[in-house]
Amino acid sequence: MNDNRIAFHHSLRGRMVLLVVMPMVVILSGVIAYMTTNSFSAVRGEAESALRLLVDQVAAEVERGNAHAVLAAKIMVFAQEEALFGRRTESSRFARRVLEEFPEFTGAYFAYEPNADGPDAENRADSDTGTVDASGRFIPYWHRDKADNDKLVVEPLLDMETSLYYDGVRRLYEQAGKPQIMVTEPYVYEGKMIVEQSYPILREGDFAGIGGVDRALNDIEQFLNEIRRRDGVELFLISSRGRLIASTVGEGELKTKEIAETPYRELFGRFYTERSERGFELAADPNDGIRYYFASAPVPTGEWLVILREAEQDVLGPIRADLVMTTSVALAGLLAVVGLVWWFASALTRRIGNAAWAAKRLASGDLSHAYTQEDRSPDEIGGMFRAFNTVFDSYRQVNRVCEAIAEGDFSQRLERRSDRDTLADAINLMSERRREAEEALNRQSREAEARAGMEAELSDLNSKLLGELNVERVADKGLSAIVAFMGAPVAALFVAQEGGRLRRVTSHAYPPGTPKFFEPGVGSVGEVARQRRPLIQAPGETTARILFGFADTVPEAVVTYPLLVGEFLAGVVELGLFRPLDERQQDLVGQGLRDHCRKHPFSSSKRGERARPTGAPDRQRTEPAHPGFGRRGDFRSGCRGTGYVFQPVRQRHAWLRSE
């Protein structure tokens, strides 16, 4: 049905695909790619920010523990400086109380410089057991028992002159000239990995000792493992001197090791070099080669460094899954849109192709089909098909009317569909003109047939009027011919005698008892003889009736004709008619008489004297009774050669005036 010879890129479907679908696919694909890239970047940025935030939270938690321990150490020192210095028993009890109140600490201690509160030897006896060394120096160290964590024991401190917790604090003060907190490197003490926080005791600006607390790294590791289980990340805690304090990676083999001694020396070395700043890097782990995000955050108290590690797959995997799902949904929607557009373009192309096919069929004159399905659609194309069906119906009507006209039925008409329907007007005018032409042709044909019949009748009349007949015989035969020709049910022929008197010589179905003689001017017969012009009358029901064998009736008209030979009256014919002759019949009779007289001239040379009317001149040709008599189309024409003239009647119920 559709024209498949149209190239795809020239077809409506192809143009919709190339100009609508393809640009839409490209644009939407670009939008999806752009949104996917931006979303990926945004979500990855959010994930990276979340990692940074998490490492900051871990560093803040470590910082909180360190700051809490440092604060406890400072409070212990402040108590010494304000009231407890030299009061060894109270000071020992204070250290024990700190350990009792803060379970996160594994030890609490004071350490005086030798003889700082007086001679140590003298004070030795007043000191509690375990709070002094052999010299009597006050160095109590309260700590939790290795076997029972709830049990507190006291013993003298060891290695003060070489350890950071004491000697390091003293040297820091001597170098800086002001007190500074000391957070030591992790070390093992009685099977525990601990870190010490100590602060100097000053007396009148001189270093007089320290006060501090110990924290077990087991607590820090437990905290880091909780973060690991909760957030699925690995954590590393590095001291100010580049030693690993704690790690969630492995089984603790990295503890207390320096960075340079681990596989992370290059990677962690970059973070450690700039440990005062936050760091972030995506790199392959030197142990397993998997790419990880590494984020670092400083711990100000103690100048520690927290490093967080999370696999790239763990960070981007959910993002990629979400983006794949989002992209899949978008592509599915795009494909659905493309499918809908393709379906719409195909349906539109098919419908428009049907319209083009219908137009071609209409142009070829095929009116046998209508689109009853297509025209039900409420859209514009449905309206177009409804218009096509209207055009088809109109052309069918035109075809029907034209076929009727071709078959001779001129009664068919086209209804005007609008005020501007010139086609209907033209076809109706053509039908009317054709009807008029056919009627004119039929009329001419009937006239020709009538003329032929009349010529035959007149020829027969002429033959009957010829020969060796007397007046009565001629009159009888002539009246019979006239009655047959005119179809008159009643007729009579009156012959003019000497003196103008009219005598009825023959009649046809004439009523009985009617006069046989008329004087000129008496009755209609006498008056026609006197006036020498025809007379038509409409008699009343009581004045004239025509008798039949079973009934009688009134004639429609009584017509009386004078028979003239030149200027002489030969007689009068009176006819009773059921239907008067119309103008066309009168013209036809007159034309027929004229044509017959032209073709069959009557000659009275052969024994014509007996048939010649009384008083008629002896000549073969007769002239019309009036000027202009015998013109074509005028019933007032005479039959030259017969000796008689029929004068037509032009008006009913009145004398017909001669010209």
Image: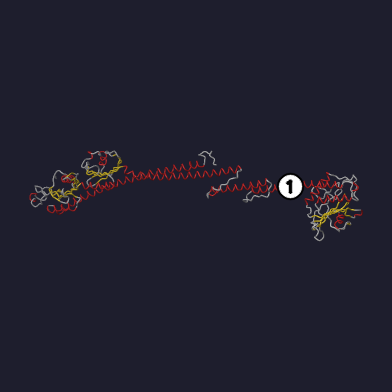
Query: In front: 496, or 625?
Result: 496
Query: In front: 406, or 12?
Result: 406
Residue 145 x/y as whole percent: 15, 49
Q: Amino acid at mark 1?
A: Asn
Q: How are the colours assigned in the image?
A: secondary structure
Residue farthest along the front direction in this orientation: 550
Dot 1 alpha-carbon crowd within 10 angstroms: few under 14, some 14 to 19, many 20 or more: few
Can the viewer see residue 656?
Answer: no
| Placement of the N terminus among the 4 image quadrants | top right
Q: How many marks?
A: 1
User: Which quadrant holds residue 656?
Assistant: bottom right
Residue farthest along the bottom direction in this orientation: 542
Can the viewer see residue 577?
Answer: yes
Q: Is residue 515 left or right of residue 18?
A: right
Q: Could you say whether the residue bearing mark 1 is in a helix, strand or loop?
A: helix
Q: Is residue 128 left or right of residue 321?
A: left
Query: In front: 317, or 606?
Result: 606
Residue 242 x/y as whole percent: 22, 41
Residue 417 x/y as whole percent: 62, 50
Residue farthest along the right direction in this orientation: 498
Residue at coordinates 81% horizontally, 61% vertically from top-left?
Answer: 542
Tag 1 residue: 442
Query: In front: 174, or 424?
Result: 424
Residue 537 x/y as whole percent: 81, 57
